[in-house]
Image: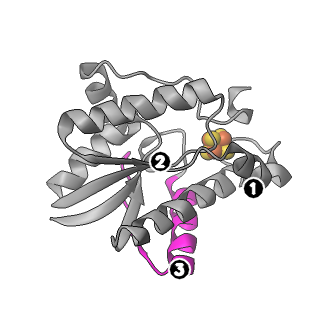
Amino acid sequence: MKKIVLHACCAPCASYPINLLINDNYKPVVFFYNPNIFPLSEYIIRRDELKRYCKNIGVDFFEGEYDIKKFYEFVKMYKNEPEKGKRCSLCFNLRFERTADFAMNQNIDCFTTTLTVSPHKNSIQIFEQAHLVSLKKGIKFIEYNFKKQNGYKISRQIAKENNMYNQKYCGCLYSMR
Ligand code: SF4
């Protein structure tokens, strides 16, 4: 099986992608890098829920830094943009750059992301940022539009079966409004 780094935002969104990647003969290595999440208590809940799920199914889990100041600095120009706007593009970019660095440090030559599973997110916008990072870092981005073929619905079913915590907002302070 070929290793792939799966950037993951939370357990419910990661559940279906992990299973699909395994079916596609990949060995996913889950990387939780989400300094956008506010407050810290919410970050810890999402992280621990994903860690628990990975442990239960025998998938490697790694955590990046919770550098929320870096996130605010990175998106400050567009902090008042609506969801799916420029702030979100930067938020994706920040998370993918760190994911690409992590993959290279692990000697893994490709990455993908769970973010496309959500019907609230534009997969094209996500792919654009991922390909920019791919070009900049010289690492492959594998396009998976996880919301296709009932991906979102299946991820919610797995979440329910595993009693996963389900968040009420995307993640950042601005999305709480
Ligand atoms: S709404 Fe979501 S994707 Fe957009 S900046 Fe906030 S956390 Fe990131």
Q: With 119 as the anchor, is 74 left or right in this view?
A: right
Residue at the image position 51 percent from the left and 29 percent from the top: 44
Front disc: 1 or 3: 1
Q: Which residues are magenta?
A: 123-147
Pointer 3 residue: 135
Is disc 3 surrounded by few (<14), some (14 to 19) or many (20+) residues within 10 Å? few
Which percent across, then down, holds residue 162? 26, 22
* Residue 138 in sight in this render: yes
Asked if the residue at label 2 sits under 8 Å from ligand 1, the reply is yes
The Cα–Cα distance between marks 1 and 3, rounded to whole angstroms, is 20 Å
Q: Judge by depth and name the residue closer to the eye, 18 or 35.
A: 35
Give the quadrant of residue 14: top left
Asked if the residue at label 1 sits under 8 Å from ligand 1, the reply is no
Give the quadrant of residue 107: bottom left
Q: Secondary structure at mark 2?
A: helix
The answer to whether residue 136 is magenta is yes
Q: Secondary structure at mark 3?
A: helix
Q: Identify the amino acid type marked 2.
A: Leu
Pointer 1 residue: 74
Residue at the image position 35 percent from the left and 36 percent from the top: 51
- When the figure is inspected, residue 46 is found, relative to residue 146, above or below; the finding is above
Is disc 2 surrounded by few (<14), some (14 to 19) or many (20+) residues within 10 Å? many
Q: Quadrant of the N terminus?
A: bottom left
Q: Identify the amino acid type marked 1.
A: Phe
Pointer 2 residue: 115
Q: Which mark is residue 39?
A: none
Is disc 1 surrounded by few (<14), some (14 to 19) or many (20+) residues within 10 Å? some
The Cα–Cα distance between marks 2 and 1, rounded to whole angstroms, is 19 Å
Q: With 27 as the anchor, is 37 left or right in this view?
A: right
